[in-house]
Image (cartoon, rainbow, N blue to C red):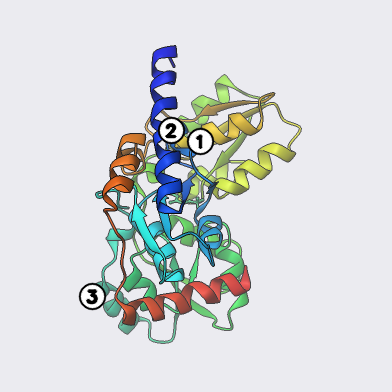
Amino acid sequence: MTDKARAGFKELQKEVLELKRELNAIIVAHNYQRPEVQDIADFTGDSLELARECVGTRAEVIVFCGVLFMAETAAILNPDTMVLLSHRDAGCPLADMIDVDSLREWKERYPQAAVVAYVNTTAAIKAGSDICCTSANGAEVVNAIPDEEILFIPDRNLGHYVSTRTDKKIVLYPGFCATHDNLTVEEVGKARQRYPEARVLVHPECRPEVIELADAALSTSQMLRYAGASNAKDFLIGTEEGMLYPLRKQNPDKEFHLISDSLVCPDMKMTTLETVIETMKARKNIVTVPEEIRVRAKRAIERMLAIS
Ligand code: 13P
């Protein structure tokens, strides 16, 4: 980054901090956000940690730097706090792969199955599910509930990964995250050739054959903990490129290489310091969830939080 760009960010960051005081706001940012956005956050983390961090905040406003389903989760858990999404259009194509009608159809097909919904779903889908899970706790959740048959929605790759860690019958809904699903066995092979000593860490939204080649399949925050505790010096990272920033920041003596340049989530990249400022200034992109949906979605999230 040039000195000019750095100075520009500093000015904008100062403005964000002033607005934060004015609004009595907290700012939370997902690990995939741009570095300069992560730097203004009170808290960064994976989706489970962000959901937890917002609970019971004394702030009047939560500025959520991430994508819509994450901000919705914050709104579900904090009905008395205004939640602002850092960019109006930042969504999650994976979350949009299942709607209420298709969930109803799948539930009719598997009436005896408990519905476990990955948090990458809309509030309405969470409301129609028995319990939520994240990439950090999928198997833990599935193994903790009494049901023997699980309808796992909407990510088939995470669902498959969970199925390798339980004896229960898992029915997979065919959704996927295009960013992770695009990562190929060939790309992992090439990266391994370049860095033969490196540990390979991938997200469980990657395809099963990619996960099989990895040393570990981990949520974003689990990657941070793994890298911090490991004796290895080199890591190949199979998740969204924003993750490189906290990994490098927390482990300056270690090297992190992205397995493929295509590991970029366009929605996560929509948020910039400018969109955060616009959002805060205008108090816009307010995320609301109808009360009837909120109450049922909250039950599914809280069941998860009680387990994990
Ligand atoms: P984490 O829960 O690991 O942060 O992942 C969230 C996500 O959306 C991955 O694509």
Mark 3 vs mark 1: in front: 1
The x, y position of residue 300, in whole percent, is: 47, 76
Q: Mark 1 — residue?
A: 39
Q: Earlier in the sequence, mark 2 or mark 3?
A: 2
The crowd level at tag 2 (other Cα within 10 Å; few <14, some 14-19, many 20+) is: many
* Left or right of 105, for residue 149: right
Q: Which mark is residue 92?
A: none
Mark 2 vs mark 1: in front: 2
The Cα–Cα distance between marks 2 and 1, rounded to whole angstroms, is: 8 Å
The Cα–Cα distance between marks 2 and 3, rounded to whole angstroms, is: 43 Å
The amino acid type found where label 1 is placed reads Asp
The amino acid type found where label 3 is placed reads Asp
- Given contact means CB atoms under 8 Å apart, are the residues at marks 3 and 1 in contact? no
Seen from the viewer's position, the closer of residues 53 and 258 is 53
Q: Mark 3 — residue?
A: 101
The x, y position of residue 153, in whole percent, is: 40, 67
Under circle 3, the secondary element is: helix
Q: Which mark is residue 13?
A: 2
